[in-house]
Image: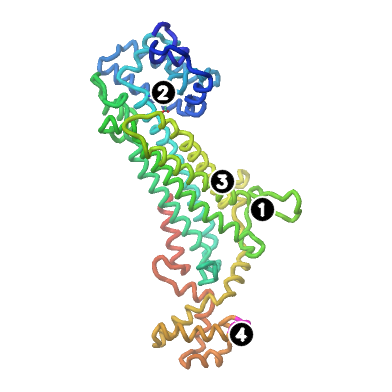
Amino acid sequence: MSSNQLDKKSEAWSALFSEPMSELVKRYTASVFFDKRLWQADIQGSLAHAEMLAAQGIIGASDLADIQRGMAQITSEIEAGTFQWQLDLEDVHLNIEARLTQLVGDAGKRLHTGRSRNDQVATDVRLWLRGETDLIIGLLTDLQRALVEVAERNVEVILPGFTHLQVAQPVSFAHHLLAYVEMFSRDAERFADVRRRTNRLPLGSAALAGTTYPLDRERVAKTLGMEGVCQNSLDGVSDRDFAIEFTAAASLCMVHISRLSEELILWMSQNFGFVKIADRFTTGSSIMPQKKNPDVPELARGKTGRVVGHLMGLITLMKGQPLAYNKDNQEDKEPLFDTVDTLKDTLRIFAEMVGGQVNPATGAKEGGITVNAAAMEAAANKGYATATDLADYLVKKGLPFRDAHETVAHAVKAATSHNCDLSELPLTVLQGFHPSIEKDVYGVLSLRGSLSARNTLGGTAPAQVREQIARHRNRLG
Ligand code: ARG
């Protein structure tokens, strides 16, 4: 390199090139505008690498001190917003290295010993994603807590449970919410599992084949808090499985959010009227003054498509790549970054929309979901939600289930023609369907009776739901 400074990207490799890049190609190949967000991970990785180089006697102690001083300066410049990011220097790695060399001279030029941008970028993305994964697991805990809080207040509230979007059997509203808690708890497990495979160190793979310097890769892994070292240099530089797995976990999590969104949108409609969300999560219409539209759940449902799209993008990105690093891999960042941003915002907003926000004056949570228990119960009273209970009653009286099923079908037909519920049919009419029916049948036909009869593990009986709430509380801390 001719000068002390690395002002132009071309100077990062050699004098081999006889013509400069066109502005268009420069812009096309550069990544600094989006990968600069990796700066902290880049510096962290470089410092761990430099410490190891010094410990191994590959660079001197004074070089290490210079690198540390330079990186501290760069950190404050980036934090203060005074760092000059240059398109000419292509990416976050060359920008930081160039500034380091500008600040500390030769020590800066020694930092890249035994390293390539190929193992450097793979390390940076992993370090960055590890931190984001931890934040996301925390946000999933917040959302689960919010759902459990609302569940706790609604154990006895009865919702028509649907299959095929037709009234099926009554369920506790809390039970319904806890179904989502199960989904989000699996999401958290999945992210924790992906984190293990993300948290392995590619650095030391160098360009693709390893390096001639006596690196101590285990030491770097330990410094960076990584659980292990990538064991094959070709795989180390080219593996993006962790990014795909992460985006797959994020897609599934967004699918869960999207299903909850769809239910909130239905429940908020005039036809259902089951719940309300706080006004700040809705918008009005510019033409219809009566409207309050559920924009936040609708957008979350829409953004799910965007995240699933990123998964398709990333998996397709890898499909035709020969080993090892190819520039294609630079395209991993924008989908991954957008996935993280979208998921984090969505989880944050949902925790607040469901559970409300702490009012600093009172310490109480305000503004979460408002439940219209009467509307839910009225809806559960339509559609013969306790027909299965009547069949089960007859089975307990000795009828085979298939016969009981048929008998109840006749009873439902009669109730339909009288335009009333099963529980509104007089005892004599019910006895006409089967003589074993007695007065106690009305307990069975009630929504509350139906609920508390489903008292097996995982069932909707309030006693079971309370146990599940206690289990979640214990688990979520
Ligand atoms: N900006 C590049 C990326 O994100 C860094 C690695 C470049 N390596 C190379 N051999 N061109 O993938």
Mark 4 = which residue?
Answer: 417
Q: Which residue is mark 3?
A: 349
Q: Are marks 3 and 4 in contact (CB under 8 Å)?
A: no
Tell me the mark number nearer the camera, choosing from 1 and 2: 1
Which kind of residue does numbered mark 3 sit on? Ile
Q: Secondary structure at mark 4?
A: helix
Specify the amino acid type for callout 1. Answer: Asn
Q: Give, as a three-letter code, the residue at label 2.
A: Ile
Badge 1 marks a residue whose secondary structure is: loop
Identify the element where label 3 is drawn. Answer: helix
For marks 3 and 4 on the same chain, the one whose residue lies earlier in the sequence: 3
Q: Which residue is mark 2?
A: 43
Give the alpha-carbon distance from disc 4 to disc 1, as whole Å. 38 Å
Q: Name which residue lies at 56% across and 54% down.
A: 261
Distance from the alpha carbon under mark 3 to that under mark 1: 16 Å
- Left or right of residue 418, residue 134 in this image: left
Q: Residues within 10 Å of mark 1 (few under 14, many from 20)?
A: some
Residue 468 at x, y percent in the picture: 43, 61
